[in-house]
Amino acid sequence: MATAERGWCLCELLRFFYSLLFPGLFVCGTLCVCLLIILWGIRLLLQRKKKSVSSSKTGKNQTVIAFFHPYCNAGGGGERVLWCALRALQKKYPEALYVVYTGDADVSGQQILEGAFRRFNIRLTRPVKFVFLRKRYLVEDSLYPHFTLLGQSLGSIFLGWEALMQCVPDVYIDSMGYAFTLPLFKYLGGCRVGSYVHYPTISTDMLSVVKNQNVGFNNAAFITRNPFLSKVKLIYYYLFAFMYGLVGSCSDIVMVNSSWTLNHILSLWKVGNCTNIVYPPCDVQTFLDLPLHEEKATSEHLLVSIGQFRPEKNHPLQIRAFAKLLNKKESESLPPLKLVLIGGCRNQDDELRVNQLRRLAEDLGVQEDVEFKINIPFDELKNYLSEATVGLHTMWNEHFGIGIVECMAAGMIVLAHNSGGPKLDIVVPHHGERTGFLAESEEGYAETMAHILSMSAEQRLQIRNSARASVSRFSDQEFEVAFLSSVERLFQKCHTCTN
């Protein structure tokens, strides 16, 4: 009797839990089915949009190739990659329809193309359709004073949704580093997706900065001083790195711009079977065509920096090191010197940074010897590079450094940061000969600049010639070959885009 009662109690207990569990399972199941139906409906809607976009005037379907580049009118190295990639694809697939998603709504498509020619000497052979996005503010770092990486990444999903609702391509290439858009285009848009990664959104180096409680542009001092906040931020970074790896692994093909970027992407995305190094295209021939000017002992030496005015470029280090150099100049009898900072300003934040740099030069008393050249034309850039003696670059863990290559091709002696792409790929010996210099600290930069300027003209000429001979591997032609070889997998099912 006792056994029967225990069995009856157990049955009643199971019925009780089932009565609680079943409605919950039913509701969850119903919600999942509804979500799948909604996603399926969205997928059908987007497929219809794709057909309407790809239909040509002749009635045949064109392959639609789209690049996601919200700042395509900026003047940085990433934009040069975009225009060279478009030019290469247009040569191989002239019948395809080309689209660029951009947030540069304050200019016309023609103005964007003219800007590409003016800044990079690149003119496309086929038309490009620009899809102007109105929600680019969602990826501005100024919108997210805290949890910036997460905020910008989530914002990119909404920006990607805006892009997808306006045009559904067959092939989607994220050329600016918005990896969180990849699942959107792949699973909802039904696109084949690729990535060109200039710089991982998060890296193991960033994790180590937080873990070791070091101050950096991505790690505020008040966090480094607080062990609890440092641990919280480290957990946040690890969770974000996991999500970043998850969305990045959706990419069908991955191109990275340097050995440094390759190591981090392989660690985070774990898609080594479809990941290749594709060095960014540098207009080396244009700069190699510049004659090497014979140095005059009494002439002023120009020290030139090329790079967008972004915080990670660390322009303040250049000005401080230059101020130290001027102090050394009096004791070491160095020639007259001038520092010229050349770069692009994307927005008001960049303009504010330039103003802060001007004030720093004033505070250090070197304002008369420092010039700023903002968004200058390509011909003016060439003139500066042909006349300069030293090319400065101070970003820690620069992913590659197109400006460094251009300086070397123009015949300047490069002084870059002892990390990242410059250390691993660019400022490396060529046939055993020195091609440039590396430094890390303010004092190190000042001392190395003083050393370069104290060398004889013949010694500098030997380094300039070796540097020039080493840069052919970064040419536009080498980029086109490597880029087309890497993206070929995305076009294997495209019959309408081939010749």
Image (cartoon, grey):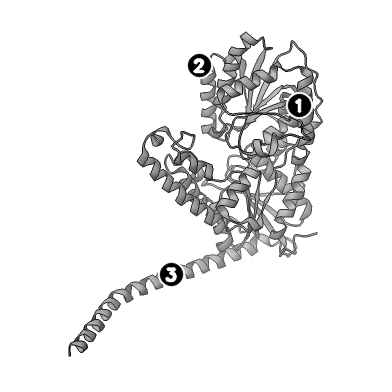
Report crowding for label 2: few under 14, some 14 to 19, many 20 or more residues within 10 A (C-alpha).
Answer: few
The amino acid at mark 1 is Ile
Would you name the residue on which mark 3 appears? 32
Are dots 2 and 1 in contact, CB under 8 Å?
no
Residue marked by disc 1: 463
Q: Dot 1, how many residues are within 10 Å of its Cα: few (below 14), some (14-19), or many (20+)? A: many
Q: Amino acid at mark 3?
A: Cys
Residue 228 image offset from top left, x and y in percent: 35, 41
The relative height of residue 288 versus residue 162 in the rendered view (above or below) is above
In the image, taking residue 489 as reference, residue 144 lies left or right, namely: left
Q: Is residue 397 left or right of residue 335?
A: left
Residue at 55% from the left image edge and 58% from the top image edge: 183
Q: Mark 1, mark 3: which one is toward the viewer?
A: 1
Q: Position of residue 7 (x, y in %)?
A: 24, 86
Q: Earlier in the sequence, mark 2 or mark 3?
A: 3
232 with respect to 106 (left or right): left
Among the 4 quarters of the image, the one containing residue 308: top right
Q: Which element type, helix, strand or loop, lies under badge 1?
A: helix
Circles 2 and 3: CB atoms closer than 8 Å:
no
Above or below, comparing residue 431 to residue 6 in the picture: above
Quarter of the rendering occupied by the N terminus: bottom left
On the image, numbered disc 2 is attached to which residue? 363
Given residues 249 and 309, the one toward you in this image is: 249
- The reply to whether residue 327 is in sight is yes
In whole angstroms, how far apart are the C-alphas of marks 2 and 3? 62 Å
Name the kind of residue labelled 2 in the image.
Answer: Asp
Mark-to-mark CA distance, 1 and 3: 65 Å
Q: CA distance from mark 2 to mark 1?
A: 35 Å
